[in-house]
Amino acid sequence: MDNETLTNEIGRTILVQVPEGLHARPVAQLVALAKSFSATLELQHGETRANPRSAVKLLLLAVKQHDRVTLRAAGADAHEAIEAISRFLEDTGEAADPHRAGGHAVPPVSAAAASNPLPDAANPPAYHGRTYHGRTYQGLGGSDGVALGPAFPYFRQVIAIDRTPVPPAARPAQRAAFTAALDDVCASTTTSDATASQIKTALIEIVRDADWTAGIAAMIDAGVPAVAAVLDAGAALAAQFEAVTDAYLRARAEDVRGAARAIALCLTGQRDPALSEAPPGAIVIAEDLNAWDVADTDLSLIGGIVCRTGTPAAHIAIMARAYAIPAVFGCADVPSLATGVEVALDGATGSVVVQPDPQERAAILASKSAWRDAQHDLLHWAPIHPRTKAGHAVQVAANLGSVKEIDAAQRAGAMGVGLFRSELLFSEHRRPMTEQEQFETYDQVARAFADHPVIIRTLDIGGDKAIPGIDIPPESNPFLGWRGIRLCLDRPDLFKPQLRALLRAAVNGNLKLMLPMISESSEIQRTRALIATCRAELAASGIAHADPAIGIMIETPASVLLADELAKEVDFVSIGTNDLTQYIMAADRLNPNVMDLSRPDSPAVLKAIAMTCRAADANHIPVSVCGEAAANPTIIPRLLACGIRSLSMSPSSILRIKKFLSETPTL
Ligand code: PEP
Ligand code: MG
């Protein structure tokens, strides 16, 4: 009915107040509301009309907060429908909780918590599949610790697409198989995470959309095999979402592709592994992993990670360290293994043993328990503010990428947050976050470390960090491309909500803002201009906000060479040794073959660090290090010698480094 005019209709123009507009969650709620009336309904935005009972059509209307829409209704309960839907659209949701829109709560979806016991430490599990007995593989140690557990191979299935036309007699069976697969996928789309469950509820509305499923049914009736029909229709719908200008809606394109793939796998009887199904203590074996792969997973349940590619400087390695998960990267030869095969790994040395023999097993278990004891003893250092033997007080702060890491950082006695990687929040949510969601998150972090500085880094998207909904055209050198501040300044639609959220959260007083990938001072000036606009907007709307300190990352060679000039424009600098090493040494941080060059203690990098420190000192601003070198005892003496008194690192390194700083006689 989208383009038809309703007869005997009544209508109303509505100013939409739903915070952030009609995105996935409010759309799911609006669909449910529309379905509770029998009236024929139509919502018009600009020239486009949609049936409010179709989630897809509603999403594609791309209605934002403060847009005007026209609602039309005809039928017995048309008045009631107009009243109820208007109330929903006009509700600012201010009285509601952050996960509600329009004051209509979404019912929670309960989680099915899968849990398999760990193998008995003393008795190796009997595994009756292939034998890999005693095979040892070498990779790069990426996150300290020893792990022993059942393998959980995480390799995506390949779907064979057969396009041979289906004979008419077999088409009804294909239709029935499609319907059953759709039901299965919808039934299995549950999660314990409240926000994720609401998004998935919306996703179910999308894949159940009458037009979309009717399109697939029509293709099947015309002889297209069900698998091909589903994947083609998924690709076509995803393309429609990708064409919308709104970043939040574009993120749905990836969801639609994922849902179509899930239905196709169901039809072929295949199944992609889901990390959330790994039994507690499992060792994940993968080609590679990224933040998005682990977004739905309780990382604290993962026993260990072995990746064929990647290096300790990859972002998944940084996440593994944040969660103290022993991990090995660049282990190119490790086989895909069968589920449950016992694997041991040492995240410090990078060795991986498949089906260790009894002697190997005993040695692994001994070093595992020694490692645990050592971790326990380190807790003594949590409340200590370290001071070197030479009398230098050193701040040891945490690098975080999720509010889930706050506890671990607090347990380790983190003296604030030296780097909050805000883009990892977006990965965790699988979409750009709204201003309100960001405000609540930054506010939570600032309050959790109220007595210390909390540095939130603005979005560093690009490189190896992709976010669904933020399109980055294919680049031949992503690390030299549209990344960090470059992308943000070109995308005020993304950057401004973050800046506004940061200005609002800065009201607490201890929050600071840090810009990544700075190469020249105009980037700072343009950001300051945008901040001034945000401040004026917030003031005009009477929204509380403050004026946080602004700092920059020093991670490009240009920023080192210009450090003296840049330091005059900011309140602090923080050296990102991961990228600084990559760019100074021209050695890809993800490439295991150039690992020997990727050393932050190479003379060229140390020279760059010293130059930066001199510039900071000359301009009387603080300098810290937040790259992985900050937690490296062989480099710390060089950093201290340059005058650095603030180090920020993964929570799992904090205790060890506090002890090192306090006890090392030569520091
Ligand atoms: C760095 O480059 O050192 C840094 C801290 O930033 P990231 O690792 O997130 O690129
Ligand atoms: Mg960096």
Image: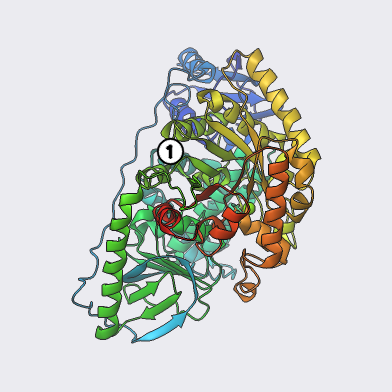
- Tell me the residue at 39%/27% (across/down): 105
Quadrant in which residue 50 is drawn: top right
| Residue closest to the eye, 368 or 263 | 368
| Residue closest to the eye, 63 or 640 | 640
| Residue closest to the eye, 363 or 307 | 363
Residue 421 % position (x, y)? 55, 46
Q: Is residue 363 visible?
A: yes
Colouring of the image: rainbow
Q: Amino acid at mark 1?
A: Thr
Residue 103 % position (x, y)? 43, 21
Residue 270 % position (x, y)? 43, 67
Q: Is mark 1 within 8 Å of ligand 1?
A: no
**Number of numbered markers:** 1
Dot 1 corresponds to which residue? 195
Callout 1 crowding tier (Cα within 10 Å): few <14, some 14–19, many ≥20: some
- Secondary structure of the residue carrying tag 1 is helix
| Residue closest to the eye, 393 or 27 | 393
- Tell me the residue at 60%/68% (across/down): 163
Direction front: furthest residue: 390
Q: Quadrant of the N terminus?
A: top right
Residue 69 % position (x, y)? 63, 20
- Position of 177 with respect to 559 (left or right) is left
Q: Is residue 584 above or below residue 140?
A: above
Q: Is residue 221 visible?
A: no
